[in-house]
């Protein structure tokens, strides 16, 4: 079955700098890769997603890149702000209605 | 829409007691998921429903756990009897599909502590 690995587990960056979180997956049939942000005391919330027919997607300060050959995808956050501090989860789905989740990355934005 | 609504937000109970967690999905959504989140195991899918029918319950830990969806606007997750290792945050999520997987909308979770 699918397995998703996420790195790093904790990432601390200076406000205004960029942050990159990386995930790898094992099942080449996976075709949908979302990223969720979880703030303290709340449920995860989708921030961006990408399907296997594209290599990159951007939404303002957030971008996701996908390398199907290498089976990895990454989240890029530019010009980080204090409100970006949260736990970020990547996930993959091999075509059914189940998401296989990464372990999460705690992003800390230092003022 | 009010989003996915879960209750209770916090539950503290003693080992052996029955626990019932409740979820109201977003109106019109045809998939409902129950997840458990712990520091050690992360987000685990317990069970999901499509049009009120359980599709995959392979993530339910054991027979002490059961879930129902009697109608499109309500689901319950029951633990009987509860054990300290069941302590976790339980999330309900829903989505509306159109042939492809889409955004999951999560509730704010029910934090369960079993003493």
Image: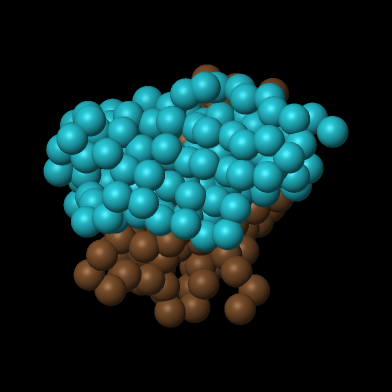
Q: Is residue A104 visible?
A: yes
| Furthest residue in direction left, as rendered | A29
> Is the residue B34 above or below the residue B63 in the image?
below
The quadrant in which residue A90 appears is top left
The residue located at (62%, 63%) in the rendering is B5
Given residues B96 and A108, the one toward you in this image is A108
Question: In the rendered image, what is the letter of the chain coloured brown?
Answer: B
Given residues B22 and A111, the one toward you in this image is A111
The quadrant in which residue B86 appears is top right
Location of residue B39 in the rendering, given as x and y in whole percent from the top left corner: 57, 24
The residue located at (53%, 33%) in the rendering is A20
Q: Is residue B110 visible?
A: no
The residue located at (49%, 78%) in the rendering is B27
| Furthest residue in direction right, as rendered | A111
Position of the C terminus of chain A, as image quadrant, is top right
Location of residue A25 in the rendering, given as x and y in whole percent from the top left corner: 28, 32
Given residues A10 and B84, the one toward you in this image is A10
Location of residue B95 in the rendering, given as x and y in whole percent from the top left corner: 41, 65
Position of the N terminus of chain A, as image quadrant, is top left
> Is the residue A20 above or below the residue B91 in the image?
above
> Is the residue A47 above or below the residue A111 in the image?
below
Indicate the colouring scheme: by chain
> Is the residue A64 above or below the residue B115 in the image?
below
The residue located at (75%, 30%) in the rendering is A14
Q: Colour of chain A?
A: cyan
- Position of B26 with respect to B67 (left or right) is right
- Position of B15 with respect to B60 (left or right) is right
Location of residue A21 in the rendering, given as x and y in whole percent from the top left corner: 50, 32
- Position of A22 with respect to B22 (left or right) is left
């Amino acid at each position: 079955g699918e397995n998703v690995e996420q790195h790093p587990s904790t990432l601390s960056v200076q406000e205004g700098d960029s942050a990159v979180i990386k995930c790898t997956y094992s099942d080449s049939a996976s075709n949908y890769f979302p990223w969720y942000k979880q703030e303290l005391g709340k449920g995860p919330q989708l921030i961006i997603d990408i399907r296997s027919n594209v290599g990159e997607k951007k939404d303002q300060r957030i971008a996701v890149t996908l390398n199907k050959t290498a089976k990895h995808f990454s989240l890029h956050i530019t010009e980080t702000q204090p409100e970006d501090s949260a736990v970020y989860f990547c996930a993959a789905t091999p075509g059914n209605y189940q998401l296989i989740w990464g372990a999460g990355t705690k992003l800390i934005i230092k003022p | 829409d009010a989003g996915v609504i879960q209750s209770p937000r916090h539950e503290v109970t003693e080992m052996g007691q029955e626990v019932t967690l409740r979820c109201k999905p977003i109106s019109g959504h045809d998939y409902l998921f129950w997840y458990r989140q712990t520091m050690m195991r992360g987000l685990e899918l317990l069970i999901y429903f499509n049009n009120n029918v359980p599709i995959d319950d392979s993530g339910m830990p054991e027979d002490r756990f059961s879930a129902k969806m009697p109608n499109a606007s309500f689901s319950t997750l029951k633990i009987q009897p509860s054990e300290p290792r069941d302590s976790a945050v339980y999330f309900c999520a829903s989505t509306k599909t159109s042939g492809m997987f889409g955004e999951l909308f999560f509730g704010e979770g029910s934090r369960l502590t079993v003493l």
